[in-house]
Every structure is written in structure tokens, then in C-alpha cells.
Image: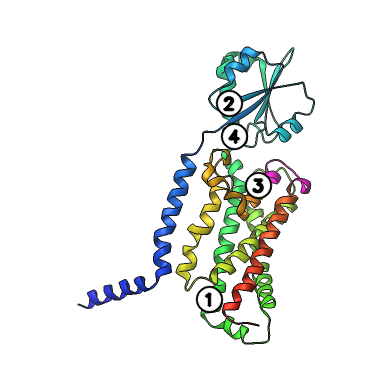
Amino acid sequence: MRILALVIRILRQFIHDKRTMALMIIAPILVLTMLSLVFNGEELKLKIGAVNVPNAMIERIEGNNVTVTKLEATEDVKREIKENDYDAILNFGRSENEIHLEGSDPTINKAIVERIRSSMGSEQTEANMAIQYVYGSSEMTTFDHFGPVLVGFFIFFFVFLIAGVSFLRERTQGTLLRLLASPIKRWELVLGYVIGFGLFTMIQSAIIALYSIYVIDLKMEGSFFYVLIITLMLALSALTLGILLSSFAKNELQMIQFIPLVVVPQLFFSGLFNLDTISDYLSWIGPLTPLYYGAEALRDVMIKGQGISDIWVDVVVLIGFSLLFIILNIIALKKHRRI
């Protein structure tokens, strides 16, 4: 009877906690649905430019999600690939044939080389074809490709979780209510928490970035200073979002249950999966998430060696997310007290 009474108490507790019940059901369904749409999306499409390539060769390469565009001779292959989003440019010269690979994704590099080899014959390809990389190299690993995304994700994940749980604890322990009872204004309170937590997130972000690049030896072509700026802006957006969502959680369990709803979906659109293959039903979500811009900027710096002129838009968007979440935090405090 005592066991039955305990079971009944727990059941009643869950039944009355409708938010937890909803999160327990909706969160896994949402994640499974997204996984289904991600893995059952479109096939990978390759875009190749062709310079002085015979029409017969182009016809053999084209098809099965491969598009070949005839180009005039170009001296700046890197600019041509960047401006027209080519995965590779195939150049047939008088003495030597060349494949200029975009190079940032080893999977795409392998697919293109195999496609061209199957069209030309592997022996002819090895003898007469020089493979050059605009970004990366033949030694670039899959982990080098995914590394910047994982750095951004783990910084975002842990900052979001720690900030949310810490702010929730401030509220449940009564510290927040005591502060709200003082003359302090809402915007001062929010900025105080953001700056206070932010100092620790700066240290965390710097340590993770340093460890990833200099200990794990992730590929690093650009400036570490730019990596630090990006990770700090990404951590700030995670911090402000975590504080915001903690306002809608009654306990730490509910805060943790926000992870599959808010953090995990961002991973799908951060570049861990090829964004070109994601279903059109989901592709619009990516630009609405901070990790989308943070991961893109980290890849541009770490893999492509790009500078501030190429990543400033991503950094500004991350700052915009943080400012938006700060404003929403100030508004959310109205339910505790009007100042």
C-alpha cells in the first residue's frame, strides 16, 4: 500500500505539471521528425565548372545530381569558385589537366574525384590529372571539417545550460525576488547578470578554443583572434538565451528539457549535416538560429583562413541575437515586478 501511495503521488505530480508532460512528449517527437527530414532530404548535388573540357567528357560527368558549367579560361580560380559556389573547376590544358577542388568538405572532394575518375578512367586520371585545393588539402580529415561546428556547438550548449540553471537557481532561492524588491531597474539587473556570467563564459570559450586548436590540433588556417571573437559572441547569445528561457521554467528539469527543443535542432542547421541536402520544409529554420552563423564563421576562419571582411556579417548577426534576447529578458522580468 505504501508503494502504491508513492506511485499515485508521483503520477499526480506529473499530471499537474502539464509543462513537463508536454516537453516529455513533444521534444522527442520533434527531434525524431527533424532527423527523418534531415536524413531523407535531397541527395547531394555537385556543381562543377569546366574549362576547355570536351563536350563528350562533360556529358559523361553530368547527371545523377552533378551539374557541369562551361567556363572561359580564368586566372583567379579561387575567386571563381567563391563567387559562383562551385565545388570544383576542371581545367584541361595542353600538357596537364587540373582539378581545382573547393576543398573544405572531404566528402565532396572524394565524390568529385571519383566521378571524374569514373568518367576518364582511373589510370588516365592518375597520369594526367593534377589535383589542387583552394581550401584544405588532401590530408584534411573529416574531423577537421566538423571540428569548427563542434567547437561552436559545445560552447553554445554548456553556456546555455549553465546560465539557464544558474539564473533559475537565483529565482527559486529568492535572490532574484529580493533584488527586484530593491530600487534596481530591470535593465540594470539583466545587464548585471549578463556581464557577471559573461566573464566566466569568456574564460570558458577561450579555453575550449585554445584546447581545440593547440591540443587536439584542429585545422587552423586563419587568425585565432577572430576565432576568439566568434566564440565569445556565440557564447553571449547562448548566455542571454539561457537566462531568457529560465524565466519560463519552474525547475531544473524543465530547463534541461529545453535542450532538445532549442539546442539540438540548431545542430542540424550548423553544417554538421550538408545544408544543401536538408529538406525544404526545414531549411528556413537555420538562419533563425545563432549556431548557424557561429559555425559558418568558425569554418570560414579555421578552414578557409578568411578574415573580418568575410565574417563580419555573421558576427553582427550574433550581436543582434544577444541584444534581442537581452531586450526580451527585460520584458520577461515584468511578470515578477513592474518598475
Give the amino acid type for the residue marked by disc 3 in the picture.
Glu
**Could you tell me how far apart the alpha carbons at marks 3 and 1 are, in whole angstroms?**
33 Å
Label 1 environment density (alpha carbons within 10 Å; few <14, some 14–19, many ≥20): some
Q: Nearer the viewer, residue 310 or 22?
A: 22
Give the amino acid type for the residue marked by disc 2 in the picture.
Val
Q: Which residue is mark 1?
A: 169
Q: Which residue is mark 3?
A: 296
Q: Position of residue 159 (x, y in %)?
A: 59, 63
Image quarter for residue 85?
Answer: top right
- Horizontal side of 295 relative to 312 (left or right) equals left
Q: Earlier in the sequence, mark 4 or mark 3?
A: 4
Q: Which residue is mark 2?
A: 66
User: Nearer the viewer's eye, disc 1 or disc 4?
Assistant: 1
Q: Earlier in the sequence, mark 2 or mark 4?
A: 2
**Could you tell me how far apart the alpha carbons at marks 1 and 2 are, in whole angstroms?**
54 Å
- The relative height of residue 162 versus residue 282 in the rendered view (above or below) is below
Q: Secondary structure at mark 2?
A: strand
Question: What is the magenta range?
Answer: 298-310
The N terminus - image quarter: bottom left
